[in-house]
Image: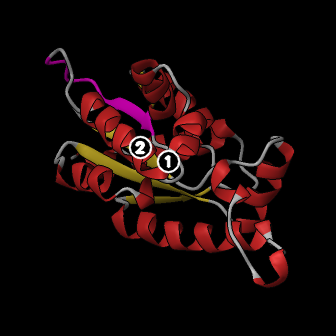
Amino acid sequence: MKFIVLLGPKHSGKTSAGRELATLLSCGFVDLDEVITERNGKTPRVLYTEGPQIFRKTEAEALAAVFKPETADSSPQVIASGGGLADNPTALTLLEQNAAAISVFLDISPDTAWERICKAGALPPFLESGNSPGGVVDKSQIHRSLHERRSAVYRQLASLVIRTDGKSPGNIAREIFDRLPELIR
């Protein structure tokens, strides 16, 4: 079984494009955040507020569970990872050591990602923290710094990089689909 793991910052299109890609490939789709919630009875947001280390541990456990298919099915599986997977050394090691995993980085500009985060409503917990002189927190700068650092990790890990700015989930999925044969051979 091949695992097509979509990597990228928050709101880069991993889940929406992942569902579309799974449809194109006629295969299964797994959202790692949903697996975490099902396995723990708590959302990633709740787990993160209990402690980033608690969340990272459950994230790695969920990825390990997804990488252990119950059947010897040879069809691919599309996996949408969490946006902060780059900060989880255990999960990254699992991904790097899985010869059946093809990593696809959905590259989005920090400005577009920030716009989408703001439109989504409540900011994620990692953007609610941070200190600066005078007690002023520039959340957009926290986001940009995290985005750039995490994107560098994803770019280095990826077998395929897809720019997502201005593209629909269907267009992103089609681009991945069209370029997958060169990676699966």
Rendering coords of residue 54 (x, y %): 41, 43
Observer able to see residue 126? yes
Describe the element under mark 1 as helix, strand or loop. loop
Pinpoint residue 42: horizontal percent, then vertical percent.
52, 25
In the rendered structure, the answer to whether residue 165 lies left or right of residue 37 reads right
Please say whether residue 178 is visible from this viewpoint. Answer: no
**Labels 2 and 1 touching (C-beta < 8 A):** yes
Q: Which portion, as a residue range, is magenta?
A: 72-80
Q: Estimate how packed mark 2 is, as few (under 14), some (14 to 19) or many (20 or more) residues with alpha carbons within 10 Å.
A: few
Q: Image height check: is 182 above or below 30?
A: below
Quarter residue 173 falls in: top right
* Residue drawn at 33 percent across, 45 percent down: 181
Q: Which residue is denoted by mark 2 in the rendering? A: 54
Tell me the element at label 2: helix
Q: Residue at x 29, y 36 (%)?
A: 61
Q: Which residue is mark 1?
A: 51
x then y, percent, for residue 16: 62, 33
Q: Position of residue 92 (x, y in %)?
A: 31, 55
Task: Look at the image and say whether residue 75 sits in the magenta stretch.
Answer: yes
Q: Residue at x 23, y 48 (%)?
A: 94
Q: Residue furthest bottom?
A: 133
Q: Image height check: is 85 above or below 67?
A: below
Q: Is 43 placed left or right of 143 in the picture? A: left
Mark 1, residues whose alpha carbon is within 10 Å: few (<14), some, or many (≥20)? few
